[in-house]
Amino acid sequence: TFVVGREQQKVFAHRCVLACRCQAFQGMLGQGLAGSEDSPGSIPPQGPFILGNVQPEVFLAVIEFLYTNSVTLNSHIALEVLTSSVEYGLQDLCKLCVKFIKDTLSVEQVCEALQVSVTLVGSQRVKNNL
């Protein structure tokens, strides 16, 4: 169980699916596993995980991608889903978001899109320099 956003919406997902599809979730869900050397693939029965800085709609889009390898985007969440895809290391989701943004970018969104791109390029430089 995840508790997401300021609204503290509960989101249910299969831990095994998340851990198999995403290394970031594998690490998150695997924290606190006693005796992990004996069973490296097992996932501890802990939770709920609180993700207060992610909007529920954005997190649900990430979950949708992890389950289906596709995602339903709209102009209100695309940039935030893109940011989450980078944070979680989901390159295929990132590509889907970039394609959607390129296809639907409007004058009203261009400043926000530029800010996100500058932030993401900066974070990639940090990763590459470590």
Image (cartoon, helix red, strand yellow):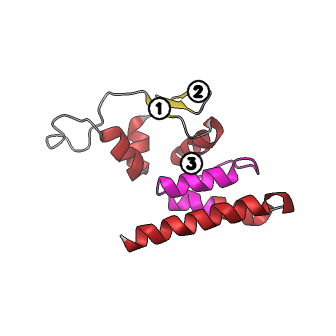
Q: Residues within 10 Å of mark 1 (few under 14, many from 20)?
A: some
The alpha-carbon separation of the residues under discs 2 and 3 comes to: 19 Å
Q: Are marks 3 and 1 in contact (CB under 8 Å)?
A: no
Give the quarter of the image for residue 61: top right
Quadrant containing the C terminus is bottom left
Give the quarter of the image for residue 104: bottom right
What's the residue type where badge 2 is placed? Gln
Q: What secondary structure is found at the residue carrying circle 1?
A: strand
What's the residue type where badge 1 is placed? Ile
| Residue placed under numbered mark 3 in the picture | 65
Residue at image location 58% in from the left, 63% down from the top: 119
Question: Which mark is drawn over residue 36?
Answer: none
Q: What secondary structure is found at the residue carrying circle 3?
A: helix
Task: Read off the magenta span.
Answer: 68-96
- Above or below: residue 117 compared with residue 76: below
Question: Nearer the viewer's eye, disc 2 or disc 3?
Answer: 2
Q: What secondary structure is found at the residue carrying circle 2?
A: strand
Q: Residues within 10 Å of mark 3 (few under 14, many from 20)?
A: some
| Residue placed under numbered mark 2 in the picture | 9
Residue at image location 60% in from the left, 39% down from the top: 60
Among numbered discs 3 and 1, the one appearing first in the sequence: 1
Q: Residue furthest right?
A: 107
Q: Is residue 74 left or right of residue 95?
A: right
Give the quarter of the image for residue 120: bottom right
Among numbered discs 2 and 3, the one appearing first in the sequence: 2
Residue at image location 63% in from the left, 60% down from the top: 96
Residue at image location 58% in from the left, 33% down from the top: 5
| Residue placed under numbered mark 1 in the picture | 50
Among numbered discs 1 and 2, the one appearing first in the sequence: 2
- Above or below: residue 38 compared with residue 12: below
Q: Residues within 10 Å of mark 2 (few under 14, many from 20)?
A: some
- Above or below: residue 20 compared with residue 117: above
